[in-house]
Image (tube, helix red, strand yellow):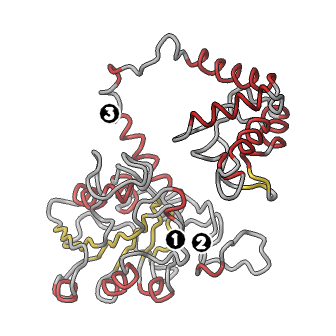
């Protein structure tokens, strides 16, 4: 699928160089290229105003299948006209049809056009969830572990007397999954089978440990709780595509204030659930004892507690630079004033290589 974006100022939906010369020619791609939702409409301003031009540009660039959500009759009319007048050569149509048919033949959709309902019970089976859980723990990135270099905070003790669990993302599988889950932009709550971070904590600790959950605990609860530690899970609401665009990238729901309030009274681990780095204010980073980037872990929250309680070490490293503030964006290794909060490739471990897992 071609992207909505541009490359060197050229829309990818109209880039013959990339779609045909590079992808199909130099790289030998034998599949077919499909446009994004109303992607060809973006080839003119106002969008779709010169639709015939959009069709000609995209098809001649190498687009084989066009995603037309609404006005397919107009598309067919314009495409036929462009072929009949020679603006789109018949050889381009033959190439697109051949590519589409090749993929359909190879994938067997002519012989088996429908999915196999007998496989329904396999989807989400135990083996799948164990694999997803492994993927979660391997993707976690430990960003801070202890306020002093020689004093680590993790792993947490499974037999801790009392643990406070707080935050908007502590008991919300929908938030863990993010966008493109069940619905386009995802959703909130128990949208699918799975284990929330809270439920994973409850399953991981000993039977003697009391787990107290308050999404937004009051000062009174924090001060009177006599908690061994606190786990605060914060992050973004699910989003997809442009509807996730934000300029500030601060932690939503007054997350920084919640973290500071809890960490002022209780030793605190913060778990950030997000599809991208968020702003970790200096006052927050200074007060907390540990920080974990959990990204969008999906349905298997036990993958998080596998590491928090020491059954597995952290192995993930940052795939991007974690900025200090949104003013630094874009930020990349090699920039003249490269000064991220955490650099590209950063990631701590709980245990030294010569130590076994406790």
Instruction: Where is residue 222? Give x, y as percent.
Output: 22, 84
Disc 2 residue crowd, few under 14, some 14–19, many 20+, Cα 10 Å: many
Residue 356 in sight from this viewpoint: no
Q: Position of residue 280 (x, y in %)?
A: 50, 79
Query: Which mark's residue is nearer the viewer, 1 or 2?
Result: 2
Q: State the mark number for residue 125.
A: 3
Question: What element does badge 2 sit on?
Answer: loop
Instruction: Please identify the quadrant where the C terminus is shown.
Output: bottom left
Labels 2 and 3: the sequence-earlier one: 3
* Dot in front, 3 or 1: 3
What is the distance, in whole Å, between disc 2 and disc 3 at their CAs?
Answer: 35 Å
Image position of 223 with respect to 187: above or below: below
- Left of 288 or right of it: where is 78? right
The residue sitting at 45% across, 72% down in the picture is 291
**From this viewpoint, is residue 27 visible?**
yes
Check the image and report above or below for 100 versus 150: above
- Total residue callouts: 3
What residue is shown with label 1?
Answer: 143
Q: Which residue is mark 2?
A: 322
Q: Secondary structure at mark 3?
A: loop
Quadrant of residue 129 in the image? Answer: top left
Quadrant in which residue 218 is drawn? bottom left
Q: Does label 3 or label 1 sit earlier along the sequence? A: 3
């Amino acid at each position: 699928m071609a992207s909505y974006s541009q490359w060197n100022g050229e829309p990818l939906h109209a880039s013959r160089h990339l779609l045909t010369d590079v992808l199909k020619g130099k790289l030998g791609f034998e599949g077919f290229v499909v446009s994004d939702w109303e992607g060809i409409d973006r080839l003119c301003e106002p969008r779709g105003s010169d639709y015939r031009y959009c069709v000609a540009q995209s098809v001649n660039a190498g687009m084989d299948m066009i995603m037309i959500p609404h006005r397919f009759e107009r598309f067919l009319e314009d495409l036929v006209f462009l072929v009949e007048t020679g603006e789109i050569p018949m050889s381009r149509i033959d190439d697109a049809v051949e590519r589409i048919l090749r993929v359909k033949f190879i994938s067997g959709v002519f012989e088996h056009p429908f999915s196999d309902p007998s496989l329904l019970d396999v989807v989400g089976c135990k083996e799948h969830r164990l694999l997803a859980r492994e993927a979660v723990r391997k993707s976690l990135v430990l960003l801070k572990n202890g306020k002093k270099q020689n004093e680590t905070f993790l792993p947490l003790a499974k037999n801790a007397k009392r643990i406070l669990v707080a935050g908007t993302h502590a008991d919300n599988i929908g938030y863990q999954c993010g966008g493109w889950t069940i619905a386009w932009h995802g959703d909130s709550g128990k949208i699918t089978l799975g284990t929330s971070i809270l439920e994973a904590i409850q399953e991981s600790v000993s039977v003697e440990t009391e787990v107290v959950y308050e999404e937004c605990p009051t000062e009174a609860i924090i001060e009177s709780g006599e908690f061994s530690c606190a786990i605060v899970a914060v992050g973004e609401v699910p989003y997809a595509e442009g509807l996730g665009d934000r300029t500030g990238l601060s932690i939503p729901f007054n997350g920084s204030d919640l973290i500071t309030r809890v960490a002022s009274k209780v030793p605190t681990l913060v778990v950030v659930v997000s599809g991208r780095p968020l702003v970790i204010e200096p006052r927050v980073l200074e007060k907390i004892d540990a920080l974990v980037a959990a990204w969008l872990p999906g349905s298997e929250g036990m993958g998080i507690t596998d590491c928090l309680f020491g059954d597995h070490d952290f192995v993930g490293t940052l795939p991007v630079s974690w900025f200090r503030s949104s003013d630094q964006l874009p930020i990349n290794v090699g920039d003249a004033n490269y000064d991220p909060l955490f650099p590209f490739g950063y990631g701590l471990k709980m245990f030294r290589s010569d130590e076994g897992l406790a």
